[in-house]
Image (tube, rainbow, N blue to C red):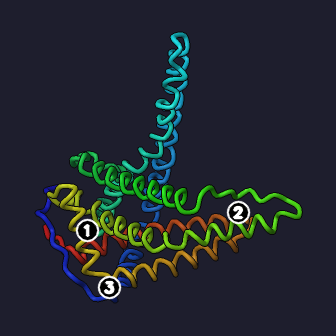
Amino acid sequence: MVLLPMATPVPVPALHGLRWLQEGFRLFTAQPGRWLMVLALWMTVMLIVPLLVGAALEDTRRVALLALKPVGMDDTLSGLLGILPVLGPLATVLMLPLIFSGLMVCCSAVAKGESLHPRLLFAALQRDPSRLVTVGGINAIGQILMAEAIAWFVQDQVGDLDFNIPAGPGAAQATAALLEKLSQLSPLVLPVLVLQTLLMAALWFTPPLLVFHNMTALQAVRASLQGCARNIGALSLYSLGVAVMLSLVGALTLSAGTSVVFAIIALLVLGTALTTMIASLYVSYCDIFQPHG
């Protein structure tokens, strides 16, 4: 597939936010069985690969410590080697845009009336995956910096938080002290919400922009921010629609009970909702960036 030129976002009516979900559901119903198969493969990859990477890194850490023990360097380097298992979750963050771009390729194929094949999930690997990994790195750095800033604020302004409430007469006093400390975190809520929203906006449209367009990672991030900024109304209505849909799915899942039949139905409904959300993101990208070719 030939990459399209750089895309410029356009504003769309707010009601389009609900239409995205409607069109996303239509894309799902076009090939529901294949979609559920692709979704299962996606979830498997996102769960198993980090576990395998984490296990391999943990084994590497243990082997390295055993090798360093005879020379007395195991204690010196144990802290440094301790970061190896953390690289497993980091691999998930780096890989997410890559696999999600494959889902966008799947959406494009279904929208064109083509047969959906699981191999399309890995199509982005053939289209300069370094740009997508760069976006994953931007997300990882943003999340790490935000977590460090929150940890610094908590430690500096609140101090240690002890969630172990002792039983007995002092339980009420300990609970009150903990609640008082937690109330001091209220100034964090708005800044964290704003920063998380900005980070999400920066990454929202980057997978389809990078997999379908000849853009660098930074150009895609900037275009994604512009697309979200110009369509706050549509995205707000879309978010409301997603929240309602997930609430209904959650209510159905909780009411399924222990029946195998109801559990299967709940899983199918959850798969339908997740696929609809994924496809609706592709629909919103097409609506806002109006790709041609």
Q: Tell me which amino acid carries mark 3.
A: His
Residue 235 image point, x, y percent: 35, 80
Picture residue at 51% right of the left edge, 48% below the top: 47
Between residue 80 and residue 63, name the one nearer to us. 80
- Classify the position of the N terminus by image quarter: bottom left
Q: Which residue is mark 2?
A: 260
Quadrant of the image occupied by residue 17: bottom left
Q: Compared to 147, does 7 lie above or below?
A: below
Q: Residues within 10 Å of mark 1 (few under 14, many from 20)?
A: many
Q: Which residue is mark 3?
A: 16
Q: Secondary structure at mark 1?
A: helix
Q: Compared to 89, does 205 lie above or below?
A: below
Between residue 189 and residue 280, name the one nearer to us. 189
Picture residue at 43% right of the left edge, 62% below the top: 35
Q: Secondary structure at mark 3?
A: helix
Q: Tell me: 248 left or right of 121.
A: right
